[in-house]
Image: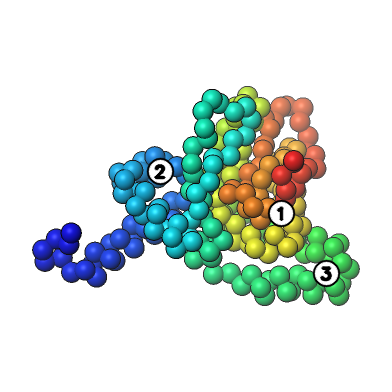
Amino acid sequence: MTPAGAPQDELATGERSTRNRVARSILDHGPSTVTELAGRLGLTPAAVRRHLDALVADDVVQAREQRVYGARTRGRPAKVFALTDCGRDAFDQSYDTLAADALRWIQERFGGDEAVVAFARARIAEQAAAYRAAIEAAEPEERTEALARALSADGYAATARSAPLPQHGEQLCQHHCPVAHVAEKFPQLCEAETEIFSQLLGTHVQRLATIAHGDGVCTTFIPKVSSTTHNTSASTAGRNPA
């Protein structure tokens, strides 16, 4: 029921604003449950469900079972809500078609896949200067977190967290990828990014999932670095290991 004296357009604007906050929270934190969204946004679960129903109807988010890495616990996996391609496009005004066409032209005219790899490495190397400075200024145990902050400053909405077995390492999660649609056609972009993470952190890293591959989050496993660990090449870049 519309409260007396409250214009309908003001109510609609407030609803859209809250709905955008729900979608933005999913963008920043990755696929989320109703409970997680309610906690982050200070809303009731019922209010979150109402906004999610509208976002699902508008093809901005989709519901799916929560992906579980490692051993499954008892019970049915929780339902999570993730952005659709349409939902990501609402936040990302990149020139995907132009970029893909340019890479295809480079591939056809200047050496095939090797030319694309060279471009991808040169591109990420330019970005990596800021990442390197952030990592070198951090304590060894805080370097993954420092990289996550630097990536977030570039629009990747990145976070660092303990791996399912914390004694084994950490996970770097990128909840947004500004070039996801291009990387779907040219996985060399993901591979070059994984290589640079390995170089910056001075350890072997493993890419577990990517948005370009259809996952909700780009996830990179970073093992604990021992005193005898040396920089090695990255593996499983740009795709799931399965």
Q: Residue at x 63, y 44 (%)?
A: 219
Q: Which residue is mark 3?
A: 107
How many numbered marks appear? 3
Outermost right residue: 111
Badge nearest the viewer, 1 or 2: 2
Left of 37 or right of it: where is 192? right
Q: Is residue 105 above or below residue 166?
A: below
Q: Which residue is mark 2?
A: 34
Task: Pinpoint residue 93: horizontal percent, then vertical percent.
Answer: 54, 69
From this viewpoint, is residue 173 visible?
A: yes
Residue contact between numbered discs 1 and 3, judged by CB atoms under 8 Å: no
Q: Quadrant of residue 69?
A: top right
- The quarter of the image holding the N terminus is bottom left
Badge nearest the viewer, 3 or 2: 2
- The amino acid marked with disc number 3 is Gln
Q: Residue at x 68, y 32 (%)?
A: 223
Q: Which residue is mark 1?
A: 190
**Element carrying mark 1:** helix
Q: Is residue 119 above or below residue 52?
A: below
* Foreground pick, 7 / 24: 7
- The quarter of the image holding the C terminus is top right
Task: Pinpoint residue 130: horizontal percent, then vertical percent.
Answer: 62, 54
* Foreground pick, 45 / 206: 45
Instruction: Give the mark nearest the N terminus, 3 or 2.
Output: 2
The disc placed on residue 236 is none
Q: Marks 1 and 3, Cα distance to the nearest angstrom?
A: 16 Å
- The amino acid marked with disc number 2 is Val
**Element carrying mark 2:** helix
Q: Residue at x 39, y 40 (%)?
A: 35
Instruction: Give the mark nearest the N terminus, 1 or 3.
Output: 3
